[in-house]
Image: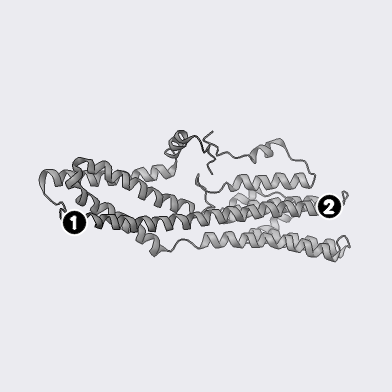
Amino acid sequence: MIIYQKDDWFRAIWHFHTGTTARSLMKRLAWVFAYVTMITIVEIRFVDLRLKDTPSEFLSTMGILLSLLILFRTNTAYDRFYEGRRTWGTLVNNSRNLAAYMSALLPAQRHNDRLFFTKAIANFAFALKNHLRNDRPSNAGELEESSQGQLSTLNLYDHVPNGIVAQMRQRTETLYREGLLTDPQLINLNNLIIVFLDVAGICERIRSTPIPFSYSFFIKLFILFYIGIMPFTIVDEYGYLTIPAVMAVSYVMVGLEIIGEEIQDPFGIERNNLPLNQISQMIRINVHELMQIYVPPVEKEAAKSGFVIVT
């Protein structure tokens, strides 16, 4: 995710046009430029194809309708992005709450239990991140062993986050049977652990429910149709200025559509997606501190965002 200085417009504009989104936009604008240049030259010099009798209100009405569609499309995509960020904020808060609660409940001499919950809570964030990105191989390098055979047991699960929650539930039941937890404490712990599954379910719903294909396809078709007929309706008045006029309109409309496509899946690896690596690492640092377990400084540095490109 790009962290930018809101008052530095010029550097923000410059950095925006260095990303993959801008490069994808420029490729499409290159096709538009070639098309509108050819149509303009042919209309002015060779064949008169201008739509002279077309009312100006026709193009204006189409522009308004297209703007409303793109606005709805962009708002829908941002709602998905914001809901994803809010859900991961819930995961951060719940991880801290559970770690603080377990730190108060578990005696200092129960080092193995304290270490288990520390690693398990931190592992859940990384496992969920990789699950949402269909990146199961990364689990081996990011998940930490919390007890003997814990990671090998997780390999048996197709849904690794579910496996981590199951292990935490089993350990809390073991502590309860040993008399270390009271009934109210067990209920409170169960409520905190259930939130992990709720978070995973919300994220999976966002990821597995894309914008309907027919709706997305119709907007793209409408944009192409609008840009396609625009040179024929304004070349009579604009002449060769038709080229920059159509390019400016295309830049806005195509750009908004590309941005909407990028942020509608907030859990990806593009620059404008959520910084799940940093959030997961921050959870790991916070949980270790709450459980009073030492964390190397290099891991604390990894929790800082590496996407600050505008300062």
Q: How much space separates mark 1 and mark 2, taking CA atoms?
A: 76 Å
Q: Residue at x 20, y 40 (%)?
A: 240
Q: Which class describes the residues within 10 Å of circle 2: few (<14), some (14-19), or many (20+)?
A: few
Examine the rendering and report whether any part of residue 196 can be seen.
Answer: yes
Secondary structure category for the residue under label 1: loop
Residue 226, above or below 215: above
Whole-percent x and y of residue 96?
73, 51
Q: Nearer the viewer, residue 305 or 12?
A: 12
Classify residue 204 by image quadrant: bottom right
Whole-percent x and y of residue 101?
79, 54
In the displayed structure image, the side of residue 259 where residue 158 appears, left or right:
right
Quadrant for the C terminus, please.
Answer: top right
The type of residue carrying mark 1 is Thr
Whole-percent x and y of residue 207?
53, 59
Q: Which class describes the residues within 10 Å of circle 1: few (<14), some (14-19), or many (20+)?
A: few
Q: Residue at x 54, y 60 (%)?
A: 206
| Residue at which label 1 appears | 54
| Residue at which label 2 appears | 104
Classify residue 185 by image quadrant: bottom right
The type of residue carrying mark 2 is Ala
Residue 163, above or below 280: below
Residue 117, above or below 281: below
